Image: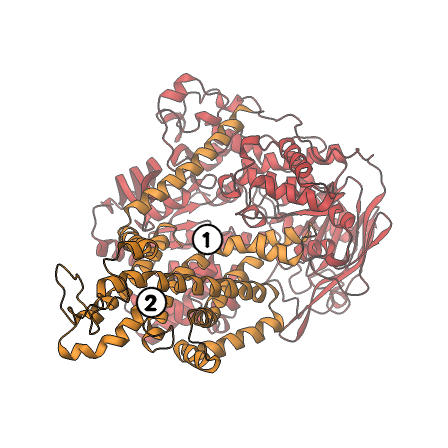
Amino acid sequence: MSMTQTNSPIPALELRNLDVAYTVRGIDRQVLRDISLTIATGESYGLVGESGCGKSTAAFAAMRYLPRNGKITGGSILFEGNDMVAMSDSQVSDLRKSAISMVYQNPISALNPTIRIGTQVAEVFRLAGSSRNDAMMLAEQALNQVRIADVARVMRRYPHQLSGGMAQRVVIAMALASNPRLLVMDEPTTGLDATVEAEVLDLVRELRRETGTAVLFISHNLGVIRHMCDRVGVLYAGALVEQGATANLLSEPSHPYTVGLLRCIPRGGLHKNTDRLETIPGTPPPLGEHFDGCVFAARCSLADDICRTQKPEMVTVGDQHVARCFKHEQAPSMPRAVEGLTAQSSGRAVRPHTTANLLNIDHLSKVFTQDGHAVTVVNDVTLHVGVGETLGLVGESGSGKTTIAKLILGLTNSETGSRLVLEGKDIAASLSKRDVQDVGAMQIVFQNPDQALNRRHSVTRIVSRAVERLRGLSHAESDDRAHELLAGMRVEASLHSARPAQLSGGLKQRVAISRAFAGAPQLVVCDEPTSALDVSVQATILNLLVDLQKQDGTSYIFISHDLGVVRYISDRIAVLYLGRIMELGSSETVFNGPHHPYTEALVSSVPAIDGSQRVRVRLGGDIPSPANPPTGCVLNPRCPRIAGSGVEHLCTSVEPDLKEVEPGHFIRCHIPIDQLRTLQK
Amino acid sequence: MNPKDSDLATKANLERAQIRKERMGLLKKNKAFIVGSVILSIWVFFAIFGNLVAPFRADDSDYDFVSSPPSMARFFGTDSSGQDVFSRVIIGTRLILVMSFIATALGTVLGTSLGLVSGYFKGWFDTILMRLLEAISAIPALIIALLAIAALDGRSPTMTVFVIAFVFTPNIARTVRAAVLGEAELEYVAAARLRTERTPHILFREILPNVLPPIIVEFTVRLGYAIFAIATLSFLGAGVEFGSPNWGTQISENWSSIFNNQWWPTAFPALAIASLAVSVNLISDGLLEVFEL
């Protein structure tokens, strides 16, 4: 990308020594500490950091639009050289109307649910003074500009009738309506599926090329930042710790935090059998913590007394590259932070890793009735999970991943003809008909520990109650057993009486894992167990899961939309689309190919952190509704490889079978494997 | 154990105490809460010690002082039968406080149970119950109460308490149901099912603690209404027996003397009702603000 420097002397946005505080329970807590950064006109600047580091606050501050309990306690926000802190409210509001726009994380909630899309987009132009008819015309143009096909139809719809990707395009169209000179994007693609995310990101890049708008891009995802930004700043605990040109900063990080962050990410090629993930020990500080020295000192392996007592200044470490660290020279060669094997769980005898099947899933189906229509969410899925094996389930939203998990656990009843066999024994479809052993044998770690742990119960009670019910122990024995379990998961004894809200995300997930292991399970379903966590915490949780598996021979069904994570932890992977298995094979074969065209599109949509350019294979259109799946192969309307395959007539008329194309590698596609291999070279 | 983890543990415990301290600090600074608490404490004091503090007995008629205006000897004056208004207001506190509290508590328990079951099971049970409750709340509560008391010929404090509990149930049930609907979707409920927990346990031990805040708010709001309702029923002669030292009854027995420019036998009990109801509402406002509900 080379739209970096225009030679305008006045930057689009400059934050100068900005301090922001939130008043929480009557006390001011500092969230941004002395932030200084500049964004040149036409430049794209990324801000990365973990949750709670102040990214979103910085985004809102750039528009001087803080929540009611937030205030600017120092410094200035210069938009094209004018200090917004000193401006009157009406001047700021004029700027927001004409020069600065924002795109929020959740597009559906950013749109008014009661107003049709056309009217809603036109309203922006009406505000700018256009007549009703002109505004409608301009709205249509704006929606065309964000590459919405069939604009006339979309304009008549309401927000809830749009997919997430479509809604985000509409929001972007509205943000661009005023021809802003600065566009603030706060995690614009975080809730979207990988293929949709990739398309929205491509769109933003193209629009930026067309309009030359400066962008402040907030994301926790380093791959996305790498793909989108000219320069990047790394935030930690409200302070800017490193800043530089994106490619340069990500390849030669000079702050220990950035180094650690890059090391914890499961990159392509790493696998649990051969590599342990690195972690950043400790957790980010709470809101408003006071620091005498460096904000990162408490978690830094290089920190010494100076780091803890003196605040470091920004040091130039390279061309345009600065880091706020006394030890920046040692940072790149910082010792690796790999925890030893720590987890201890059930005390159950270690099962030998055999090739025997633990769970056989035969012809699993689920049909929901929605407004009188039958909707097949899971369509005839046959799978097995081996003892001590991890089976990864990947696919976009609506692919049926979570429903499969619920069917296995008995939380939802499967259709007749479906069969679950655990170690040779048939398992009832409904949870209430299963005996205690079967219930305890299959457990789950949910995605969001905030919802999965009862916030009114203590940590001990959450785990102990599960032990009591699933193992039939007395109350006192259960408490003892729960404490052992928690200690094994490295949840410190003094936290056992705490409520979940007092724990960090990672600790909450450890408690949830302890609970899942309370009944000495043979199979644990992990439903996106790390997607609510920051990357540094994600690494510790993945390491813990791997350790538990190595010790007890527990099998996992691992559901995730993060392909890097799935690839790292899975032995075999099933790729799902519209409730069907499209591809099944070992982790390596699924990722290395030849792939099913859907897998190919999925894999190519992930923005790489190392900046390596893959050929993007695009899926056209949106995921069709499972209520009305396409005839023939369900992928055919979106398939990137159908054109010119020579079997188009088959693809649109006959649904292909899941065929074994290589030993242990199954693909549901009419296109012959050799042809796929050549196409995907 | 990793030293950083133990730091973290102490920190979490400190933070918990800290949050509590900060909340209490805010509550102590919250004017609505303070004023409400002060007024309510005065009434609670009278409810407990009223008989000891009152200068005269409630049914003492002093015919030397008939319809005399407020003075140093008779703070709130006397009514047409020579009874001391101040003493009757003070002694009447206990009945209205106890009655409104029990009625509200009863209604809350009933409403909470129905709301929990309805919100958790949904389906036909929920539909029928909700239509039924809507039907009840469509009729003005006072009319239902009067009808019930007349039909059951139960002009007693006990009957009044039951009737008010009954008419409050729909509102509370609906509030609880709305909270439960969201709560039942959360994964901790699925987690409870996955350890073979029975439904009553899930309802009362898992979900109930999480919907307590709106229930507490609803309780304080209803308590205010109950005070008014009981006073009104007594005023209409349906609440308690005539002649007892009761604020509503006092007003109804003496309101005609307003036309003789004798405002004191009615104004003071009316003020008592208003201040009690307002104090409860102020407290609920303060709680709402501090706990950010």
Q: Which chain is red?
A: A
Chain for disc number 1 = A
* Residue A102 appears left or right of A557: left
Q: Judging from the image, what secondary structure is the residue with disc 2 in?
A: helix
Q: Give A593 or B271, whichever is nearer the viewer.
A: B271
* Residue A188 appears left or right of A620: left
**Which residue position is annotated with label 2?**
A125
Residue A475 in view here:
yes
- Residue A680 percent coordinates (x, y): 70, 49
Location of residue A238 by image quarter:
top left
Q: Is residue B30 above or below residue A232?
A: below
Q: Could you tell me if the residues under marks 1 and 2 are in contact, i.e. CB atoms within 8 Å?
A: no
**Which residue position is annotated with label 1?**
A105
Q: Residue at x 55, y 66 (%)?
A: B114
**Chain B display color:** orange
Coloring applied to the structure:
by chain
- Residue B113 percent coordinates (x, y): 55, 63
The amino acid type, in three-letter code, at marker 2 is Phe
